[in-house]
């Protein structure tokens, strides 16, 4: 990251990536479909004393001119846009020549398969395609791409505390749990907790890095 680069945190959620970029001196914009997430992102930026522009907007129809950004990053965000091709085209459109991108995607693992089995309307079903290097290369033909693998770990003092953290802080999961009765929530907790070991949940992800040709 270089000072004053125009940086877009795409599908920014509560703005964690935007905060890192702003601290590095970038000129940062964050955009997300959720008004509630944007409110939280603005509060976090204000608390950190950082100047970050946040907009409510759709990754499939970004409210920015062509070639607006030097860097576009999306941490487990743009992958959830329903129309992958439109989202990828918009990401490409707002990148200037030579711009860099970074996108992370979950892979097909036990957590994903459990979500798919338990939640009939699981919003992540199509997102897993972003974990396929050949598929992503087809979505982003104007970028010179490279791929890396990493592991994300959510940890707490115990399995119970880790589950409480996950069930209260992952918005789609929390929203689904809120639709269940007490027995349903207990059954779900038992199945999810089976994937938590030693107070932590570890998941592998794909990191897509690219430079606009």
Image (tube, grey):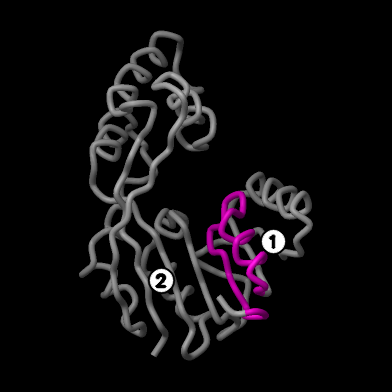
Percent position of residue 81, x then y: 44, 57
Q: Nearer the viewer, residue 136 or 83?
A: 136
Q: Quadrant of residue 31?
A: bottom right
Percent position of residue 56, x then y: 65, 58
The residue depicted at 75 percent of the width and 48 percent of the height is 43
Relative to residue 103, is residue 14 drawn left or right? Answer: right
Image quarter hosting the C terminus:
bottom left
Relative to residue 18, is residue 140 drawn left or right? Answer: left
Check residue 29 for magenta coloring: no
The segment highlighted magenta reads 3-26
Residue 88, which numbered label?
Answer: 2
Q: Which residue is mark 1?
A: 54
Check residue 9 for magenta coloring: yes
Percent position of residue 13, x then y: 57, 51
Q: Nearer the viewer, residue 177 or 82?
A: 177
| Image height of 90 relative to 98, above or below | above
Q: Quadrant of residue 19?
A: bottom right
| Image height of 73 relative to 200, above or below | below
Q: CA distance from mark 2 to mark 1?
A: 20 Å
Tag 1, which secondary structure?
strand
The residue depicted at 27 percent of the width and 32 percent of the height is 114
Percent position of residue 115, x then y: 32, 34
Tag 2, which secondary structure?
helix
The residue depicted at 28 percent of the width and 23 percent of the height is 194
Q: Earlier in the sequence, mark 2 or mark 1?
A: 1
Q: Quadrant of residue 202?
A: top left
């Amino acid at each position: 990251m270089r000072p004053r680069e125009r940086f877009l945190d795409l599908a920014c959620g509560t703005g964690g990536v935007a905060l890192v970029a702003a601290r590095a001196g970038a000129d940062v914009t964050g955009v997300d479909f959720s008004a509630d997430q944007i409110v939280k992102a603005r509060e976090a930026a204000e608390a950190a004393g950082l100047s970050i522009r946040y907009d409510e907007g759709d990754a499939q129809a970004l409210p920015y001119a062509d070639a607006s950004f030097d860097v576009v990053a999306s941490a487990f965000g743009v992958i959830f846009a329903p129309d992958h091709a439109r989202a990828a085209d918009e990401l490409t459109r707002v990148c200037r020549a030579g711009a860099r991108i970074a996108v992370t995607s979950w892979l097909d693992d036990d957590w994903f398969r459990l979500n798919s089995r338990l939640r009939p309307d699981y919003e992540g079903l199509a997102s897993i395609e972003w974990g396929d290097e050949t598929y992503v290369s087809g979505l982003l033909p104007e970028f010179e791409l490279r791929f890396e693998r990493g592991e994300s770990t959510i940890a707490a003092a115990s399995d119970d505390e880790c589950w409480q953290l996950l069930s209260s802080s992952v918005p789609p999961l929390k929203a689904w749990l809120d639709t269940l009765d007490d027995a349903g929530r207990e059954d779900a907790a038992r199945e999810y907790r089976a994937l938590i070991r030693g107070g932590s949940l570890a998941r592998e992800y794909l990191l897509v890095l690219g430079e606009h040709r």
